[in-house]
Amino acid sequence: MASRYLEPEIERRSRAAMTRWQAGRLRGQVRHAAAHSPFSRRKFKAAGVKPGLIRSFDDLPRRVPRLDRIRSAIGFAPRLSLDQIIRSLIQEQRAS
């Protein structure tokens, strides 16, 4: 009989172990983006975010500015939607 889990080693972890694993993956993704993506480096710099300071998901609300606050403070409105930004990232990565 097939297992009901696709990735048993991952899916059966305790909450604490899963949180540690996810935080490690997040740090790796942020490091990779900062090292290999000019777009991400520009975004980090513009937001005043130091990628090395993002250690866990708890750091995201504190380290990444909320756009609604910026919008209300200075009248900022993004030119691109999140979907457009993601598509642009994918195209940029495919081209490189």
Image: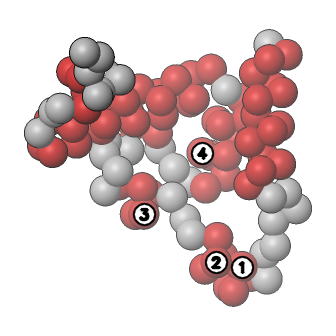
The amino acid type, in three-letter code, at marker 2 is: Asp
Q: Is residue 7 above or below residue 74?
A: above
**Residue, disc 1:** 71
**Residue, disc 2:** 68
**Circle 3 or circle 4, nearest the eye:** 3
Instruction: For marks 3 and 4, give the CA distance.
Output: 14 Å
Q: Please report the residue visible at 57 percent of the width from the left and 69 percent of the height from the top.
A: 66
* Circles 1, 3 touching at the beta carbon (< 8 Å): no
Residue 61 circle label: 3
* Circles 3, 2 touching at the beta carbon (< 8 Å): no
| Image-quadrant location for residue 73 | bottom right
Q: Is residue 47 above or below residue 16?
A: below
Which is more toward the observer, 3 or 58? 3
Of labels 4 and 1, earlier in sequence is: 4
The amino acid type, in three-letter code, at marker 4 is: Phe
The amino acid type, in three-letter code, at marker 1 is: Arg
Of labels 1 and 3, earlier in sequence is: 3
Of labels 3 and 2, earlier in sequence is: 3
Instruction: For marks 2 and 4, give the CA distance.
Output: 18 Å
Callout 1 secondary element: helix
**Residue, disc 4:** 44
* Circles 2, 1 touching at the beta carbon (< 8 Å): yes
| Residue 46 x/y as whole percent | 67, 52
Label 2 neighbour load within 10 Å: few <14, some 14-19, many 20+:
few
